[in-house]
Amino acid sequence: MATRPPSLDRRSFLTASAAAAALLATDPRGLLARSVAQPAPSNFSDLRGGVGIFSGQGGTIGWFIGPDGAVIIDSQFPRTAEPCRKGLLSRSEKGLSLLVNTHHHGDHTGGNAIFRSDRDGKGVGRIVAHAKVPALQKAQATSRGSEAGQVYADTTFETTWKQDLGAETLHAKHYGPAHTGGDIVVRFEKANVAHLGDLVFNRAHPFIDPAGGGSIIGWPAVLQAIHDDFDDDAAFIFGHGQPAHGVVGRRNDIALMRDYFRRAIDTVEAGRAAKLSREEIAAKTPEGFEPFVSFNERMSLRATLEKTWDELEAKSASAEAE
Ligand SMILES: [Zn+2]
């Protein structure tokens, strides 16, 4: 019997209100009050090969139900991690096995405590991340006064990491500084699905974080290397995406983001060569950025050009100092 090719059919269902009500009952300080009017969205979608996504608030969560329990990629915030945990426990007899953080940002690690919690004997046994993630996460939490709620990775690695999941194999790889200094790509080998964290903002201006070790100059080379590591069948989960295009895509979406950064660097280098100021360059609206929308001022074409200018300026300053 012929096997059908893997598809990206999605099956969605909502379990919002009950989970939100349960969560509110455990919220003594009323921090979740807003969720009364706006129940925490808890939307599970199956992708293929047992891999799926959960869209709530913040970076997309990826998941896989393995023989030793559920594997979770990123944890959003406590408010949405709770209904995600509940939904995964209903699908996974063995509970939760493993949590992987694609990078340190709060909308990818804020729910770590929820998944780690062993209150029913079913919390994750390990949290895996790049070696730089715990320190970056701590620094970010200190700057925001949110140290108390942090739970950090206990298994870290520098370049690659691998885990046998029965019929499936999980791979994680760091390609170099890009969105942050500790980004990893998490790949389910057999399903041929990979979670890219925030290395791709699908057709949206990205959040750029030099303080978190990010690099606009390094970013396009990282995306090229990822593009080369996969084939056209591969499906990718992105941390964020323009609503019209979603958070699941293909290799061409990676190439589009790669070209975004190449174009930003070219624009700023041409402006600097023409002796234009940072302000003059940041006010430019060059062609080629039309597919990308802006979520807010911090994530806009202007912000990208300003931060590109800053990085190129710092690079040439340090070259002159040598
Ligand atoms: Zn991020």
Image: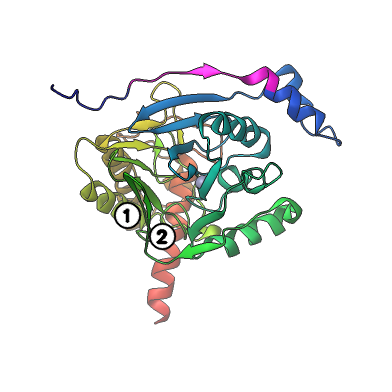
Quick one: quadrant of the N terminus?
A: top left
Query: Which stretch did the figure color magenta?
Result: 9-18
CB within 8 Å, label 2 to label 1: yes
Q: Any atom of ligand 1 within 8 Å of the CB at mark 2?
A: no
Is any atom of residue 277 visible in this view? Answer: no
| Disc assigned to residue 222 | 1
Percent across and percent down for residue 173 are: 36, 57
Residue position marked by numbered label 2 in the rendering: 177
Judge left or right: residue 39 versus residue 64: right
Name the residue at the right extreme: 28
Residue 15 falls inside the magenta stretch: yes
| Disc assigned to residue 272 | none
Front residue of this view, candidates 84 and 227: 84
Is any atom of residue 77 visible in this view? Answer: yes
Q: CA distance from mark 2 to mark 1?
A: 8 Å
Picture residue at 42% right of the left edge, 57% below the top:
215
Judge left or right: residue 121 versus residue 44: right
Considering only vertical position in the picture, is 107 above or below 14?
A: below
User: Amino acid type of disc 1?
Assistant: Val
